Image (cartoon, grey):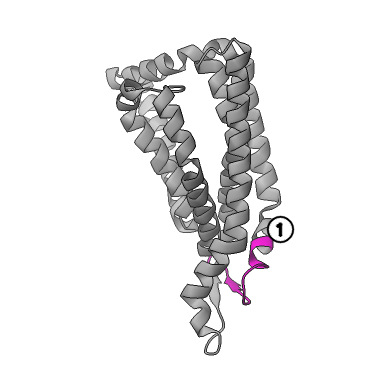
Amino acid sequence: MNTQDKDIIDKIDEWLQPFYKYKIRVFSIVLIFFLMWFVGFFFAAFIIKFFESNIPFKINFLQLYPYEMLFNYLKFGFLFSVFVNFPFFVYQFGKMKVNINNLQDKSNLFLLSLILVVSALLSVFLSYKILIPLQLFLLYGLNLNIAEFSVNISSFISTICFNIYLVMLLLLLPVVKQLVKKEVFFNYATLVKYKKQALIALGIIAFFIISPAEIVAFAIVFFIFAVWYKIVIHLSKKRD
């Protein structure tokens, strides 16, 4: 293992150090995340049809690639899991990082989680009843008497996810403002210290929200090649 790889592993280990004593809590977060990912994947078709039913005109979905629906359902399941588990993640993160002991702090953390649940449900409702139908009608409604509305299924799923997350982020701005003001989870020094890691994480989330299936396929193939490259390096080092 070279020095650069060792430095990266040491940094990751240093960041994970405070979480080691909460192994059961971390395991529950990971387990529930993958469980909800499976649930989101299984119900993806029903949820998509549910959103389609509120559009003021009929949509003709197009599937452009043989594997497109598989990757779209995986993407939808991932975003569904993040969306549903977000309040749970915040609550568990608060229990681990803020060292909450007194009843008042526990009540505040529970209240925050409840606000997140309400914001999530409200964002789905507003997106379903107002934003997505209005957005699609303004963009494509003028074609009602000229051409049938057809859309790539990846684009429609990305539109659903984008609108829901946009509304939720707007609803949570006052909450984030209060958290920053009171330094509940983080302060200025922490935000600056982990700026690069945060941008990478946000980039990954944005990638899953808007990426078409072929880009996801490219990422998976590239990952497989990278793993094989590492294996060849290891075997070559062992031989030499």
* Residue at image coords 43%, 54%: 215
- The region drawn magenta spans 50-67
Q: In x, y percent, where is residue 166?
A: 48, 51
Q: Name, please, the residue furthest toward the bottom.
A: 146
Q: For this rendering, which residue is in front, 120 or 224? A: 120
Magenta-colored stretch includes residue 106: no
For badge 1, the amino acid type reads Phe
Q: Is residue 36 above or below residue 191?
A: below
Q: For this rendering, which residue is in front, 183 or 236? A: 183
Q: In x, y percent, where is residue 163?
A: 51, 56
From the image, give the main secondary structure of the stretch colored magenta. loop
Label 1 packing within 10 angstroms: few (<14), some (14-19), many (20+): few
Q: In x, y percent, where is residue 238?
A: 38, 20
* Residue at image coords 66%, 39%: 36
Residue 178 falls in image quadrant: top left
Q: Quadrant of the C terminus?
A: top left
The residue singled out by tag 1 in the image is: 46
Q: In x, y percent, where is residue 109?
A: 58, 24
Q: Is residue 207 above or below residue 54?
A: above
Q: Is residue 51 above or below residue 13?
A: below
Magenta-colored stretch includes residue 66: yes
Q: Is residue 102 above or below residue 119?
A: above
